[in-house]
Image (cartoon, helix red, strand yellow):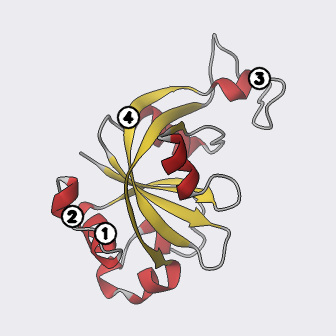
Amino acid sequence: MACWLMKSELDVYPWGQLVEDGGTHWDGVRNYQARNFMRDSMKLGDLILYYHSNCKPPHVAGVAKVVKEGYPDHTSWDPDSKYMDPKSNPESPRWFMVDISPVKEMEPVSLDDLRKNVSLEGMPLLARGQRLSVQPVEDEHFRIICQMGGVTPTSLGL
């Protein structure tokens, strides 16, 4: 099992909406590296830190899991979608997505608190200029952040 961090803007798709919906497809990713993670690396049951970006303060809000592995992002060929890409089509999809569902809410863990924790040194999220919306998280970093948010890692199978 691998661990990931996925960013969503609080005013676009908050943690509470994921919980209310019971899950969602993670569409609209238009970065090749993030796409490759979803298409090639994210596997059924992988755990995800659900991160709210572009808010004050940015923070980890909960833990989710992958419930469907990578498949073509149909919004890329939907002319009514803001994620439309004219170079993508069903016969030759350019973009991919995964389905996720909520596992456990946590006490918010702010970006400032993450930066203050020396045990998280080297975590991609904390690197200067890191804007990738889907990124891997080392198991140990995942455990530490869960504990910071009041979630026992063993309750997640870690």
Packing grade of label 2 (10 A; few <14, some 14-19, many >=20) is some
Q: Circle 1: is it few (<14), some (14-19), or many (20+) Cα within 10 Å?
A: many
3 vs 1, front mark: 1
Residue wearing tag 1: 146
Residue 97 locus on image (x, y percent) = 54, 34
- The mark tally for this picture is 4
Residue drawn at x 49%, y 49% is 19
Q: Nearer the viewer, residue 76 or 17?
A: 17
The residue lying furthest to the right in this view is 80
Residue for badge 4:
67
Mark 4–mark 3 Cα distance, whole angstroms, equals 24 Å
Element marked by disc 4: strand
* CB contact under 8 Å: marks 1 and 2: yes
Do the residues under discs 3 and 2 have CB atoms within 8 angstroms? no
N-term mark: 4 or 2: 4
Which amino acid, mark 4?
Val
Which picture quadrant has residue 119?
Answer: bottom left
* Circle 3: element type: loop
**Where on the picture, by quarter, is residue 140?**
bottom left
Q: Residues within 10 Å of mark 4 (few under 14, many from 20)?
A: many
Q: What residue is drawn where x is 47% and y is 41%?
A: 22
Gap between marks 4 and 2, in whole Å? 19 Å
Q: Amino acid at mark 2?
A: Pro
State if disc 3 and disc 4 touch (CB < 8 Å): no
Q: Which mark is residue 153?
A: 2
Which of the two labelled residues, at mark 3 and mark 2, occupies the earlier sequence position? 3
Tell whether 118 sits left or right of 50: left
Q: Tell me if 94 is positioned left or right of 65 in this view.
A: right
Q: Residue furthest front?
A: 20
Is residue 133 something that shows in the picture? Answer: no
